[in-house]
Amino acid sequence: MSAFTLRLRELGFGTRVGLSALVLAFGIGLAASAWHLQDHHHNRDEQPGVSLEDLEGAYHGVNTTAPLVSALERGHPEALATQEREFLLVWLRSGRIVEDYDSIDLGDSAPEGLIRANCLPCHARNASAGEGIGARVPLEYFDDVKKLAFSKSVAPVPVRVLAASTHAHALSLAAMSVVIGFLLIATRWPAFLRNGLFALAGLGLVGDLAGWWLARSSAAWVPMIVASGATYALATALSLALVFLELWLPRRRESS
């Protein structure tokens, strides 16, 4: 005997309308969660879009050296005089990157002049030297330079905030997923699909939540957050779509 014989398509019209509205509400919530993720994390690395560095900053914290500092420290460009190299490094570590970039008080030693004289032969957009590096990494204007001039230190969210977020997400999403999972079980779709999506949603959710805490001790766990979160979102979205289809597709004729 089947352990679960209810089929959503056999429910009354009003019940199916109500369930359809709830499925759409779940879908709206899922879309809002994706938007919130983008809005909440996208600017931690000061670059467009949500990246692994954004998530690493949120759950583990990041300390990155400005690309210009790294280049100068490793001896690039080779022809730059030692005194000028040290001056640029002092400027980049000074906390006055914006104020002193083209300071009149610094005269010929202003960073803008040093960069123009020593870097633009290769890093101008139309430079013939540098094998096209100028088009990829231009340094002609301060808007170009500032993208590479700032070292970053991003602290992870406080433990109390992470605990509160875990509390809210674990209880609400787990409860929602149970409801969606049992609705999915009551559909006509093959058992492997229903059971598989239910399993993926559960594993994805617990992996996502566990990854938040594991990533505090090691950034190596950040990809687990990404993979688990994507698995949960995709499994949930597909489950909702299959439930909605079940509610409105023609009744399936049972074989005698």
Image (cartoon, grey):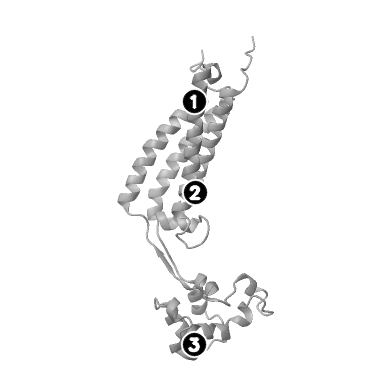
Q: Position of residue 176 (x, y in %)?
A: 43, 33
Q: Position of residue 88 (x, y in %)?
A: 47, 82
Instruction: Give neighbour class at mark 1: few <14, some 14-19, many 20+ (Cα, 10 Å).
Output: some
Q: Residue at x 48, y 89 (%)?
A: 109
Q: Relative to the observer, which residue lies in front, 179 or 146?
A: 146
The correct choice, above or below, for 243 with respect to 113 in the image is above
Q: Is residue 178 visible?
A: yes
Label 2, on which residue? Answer: 226
Q: Secondary structure at mark 3?
A: helix
Query: Where the C terminus falls, by quadrant?
Result: top right
Contact check, label 1 and label 3, Cβ < 8 Å: no
Which mark is first along the chain, 3 or 1?
1
Numbered circle sitting on residue 84:
3
Q: Residue at x 51, y 75 (%)?
A: 68
Q: Closer to us: mark 1 or mark 3?
A: 1
The correct choice, above or below, for 30 with respect to 62 in the image is above
Tell me if 49 is positioned left or right of 135 in this view.
left
Q: Position of residue 15 (x, y in %)?
A: 49, 20
Instruction: Give neighbour class at mark 3: few <14, some 14-19, many 20+ (Cα, 10 Å).
Output: some
Amino acid marked by disc 3: Glu
